């Protein structure tokens, strides 16, 4: 039995073991990316708090945090689009 042999799924479509492996890998990659983005958002907040605690005026710190947050949102949207494109391409193969 090799990895490309077909298995019958519950909804009647055939899925190869390679497809299942690829789905698991994609799910893992999504989780890693999500964790990295959450960590980056947390670091933005921690950095902002440290800046305020070190004596920088809040009105100087908040715009920088907002800018970093917007950059993170844009980055997240780009990652999401790339993953969706990759998923569509892998399904069409």
Image (cartoon, rainbow, N blue to C red):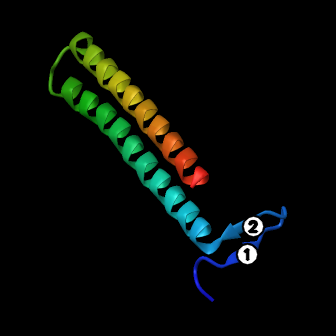
With respect to residue 72, does 17 lie above or below?
below
Residue that numbered label 2 is attached to: 14
Residue at image coords 24%, 18%:
61
For marks 1 and 2, the one nearer the N-term is 1
Q: Name the residue under label 1.
A: 7
Give the residue displayed 41% in from the left and 32% down from the top: 78
Question: Crowding at label 2, few (<14), some or many (≥20) Cα neighbours within 10 Å?
Answer: few
- Circle 1 Cα neighbour tier, 10 Å, few/some/many (<14 / 14–19 / ≥20): few
Kindly indicate whether the residue at mark 2 contacts the one at mark 1 (C-beta within 8 angstroms): yes
What secondary structure is marked by label 2?
strand
Image height of 70 relative to 89, above or below: above
Q: Gap between marks 1 and 2, in whole Å?
A: 6 Å
Residue at 33% across, 32% down: 45
Left or right of residue 6, residue 35 in this image: left
Instruction: Answer left or right for 60 relative to 73.
Output: left
Residue 66: horizontal and vertical position, in percent? 34, 19
Direction from residue 14 to residue 24 in the image, left or right: left
Horizontal side of 5 relative to 59 (left or right) equals right
Relative to 25, does residue 37 appear above or below in the rendering? Answer: above
Tell me the quarter of the image containing the N terminus: bottom right
């Amino acid at each position: 039995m090799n990895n490309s042999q077909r298995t019958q799924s519950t909804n009647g479509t055939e899925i190869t073991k390679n497809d299942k492996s690829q789905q698991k890998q994609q799910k893992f990659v999504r989780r890693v990316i999500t964790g990295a983005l959450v960590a980056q958002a947390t670091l933005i907040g921690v950095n902002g708090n440290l800046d305020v605690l070190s004596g920088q005026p809040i009105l100087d710190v908040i715009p920088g945090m907002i800018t970093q947050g917007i950059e993170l949102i844009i980055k997240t949207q780009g990652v999401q689009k790339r993953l969706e494109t990759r998923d569509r391409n892998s399904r069409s193969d």
